[in-house]
Image (cartoon, helix red, strand yellow):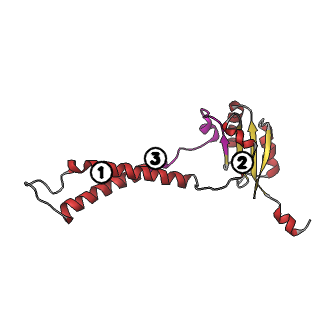
Amino acid sequence: MSAATRDLKPRLAGYLAEFETADALFLACRRMRDEGYTRWDAHTPFPVHGLDDAMGLSATKLPYLVLAGAACGAGLGLLLQWWTNAIDYPVIISGKPLFPLPANIPVIFEMTVLFGALSAFLGMLVFNGLPHYHHPLHKSARFKRATRDRFFISVEAGDPRFEAAKTRALLQSLGSSAVEDLEED
């Protein structure tokens, strides 16, 4: 085999293990968590109660980001209206104050909602590592059943505990019906 042929051989990106039932997947996820794997995921056709805990997933930081974005939006809405009404273009009408807070609440509310929604959207993209245009799972014909009737665990080769033979043996010992190699292009 020439060096050029060796370079064309696909690189192992990880493994995909298939499970028949949600209970089997749940137990396998607990074991994967206990083994110390960190770059892996479970794929199910419907939500499985308690799977997040079995996987050892921590709570997301997204609500804090949304709160900070909403607070910035409220502050900017308040600042904008104060500047335009009291400083930049003050209009004195019948002795009313230059900056009446009740009249400005709708704009403050709308800015709060806008900035909260934008921070939720952008935070979701950043926290999920999106956009991600290609993943080795997309090439698996077996994985297409994840939206119908099968349950899967995918383990990335980039996991610190990943060793090809040991990880494959672990996935087979968890009761999976099949373990498939995922290859990068």
Q: Specify the label residue 63 is tagged with.
A: 3
Residue 172 visible from this viewpoint = yes
| Residues at marks 2 and 1, CA–CA distance in whole angstroms | 46 Å
Which quadrant is home to the C terminus? Answer: bottom right
Q: Is residue 57 magenta?
A: yes
| Residues at marks 2 and 3, CA–CA distance in whole angstroms | 28 Å
Residue 31 visible from this viewpoint = no
Q: Is residue 53 magenta?
A: yes
| Residues at marks 1 and 3, CA–CA distance in whole angstroms | 20 Å
> Where does the magenta region start and end?
41-65
Furthest residue in direction bottom, as rendered: 3
- Give the residue type at disc 3: Pro
Q: Nearer the N terminus, badge 2 or badge 1? A: 1
Q: Nearer the N terminus, badge 2 or badge 3? A: 3
- Tell me, yes or no, whether the two marked residues, 1 and 3, touch with CB atoms within 8 Å: no
Q: Secondary structure at mark 1?
A: helix
Q: Secondary structure at mark 3?
A: helix
* Residue 175 percent coordinates (x, y): 78, 35
Disc 2 marks which residue?
155
* Residue 21 percent coordinates (x, y): 71, 31
Give the left or right position of residue 78, taking residue 114 as reference. left
Q: Residues within 10 Å of mark 3 (few under 14, many from 20)?
A: some
Residue occupying image coordinates x 57% and y 52%:
128
Disc 1 marks which residue?
108
- Give the residue type at disc 1: Ile
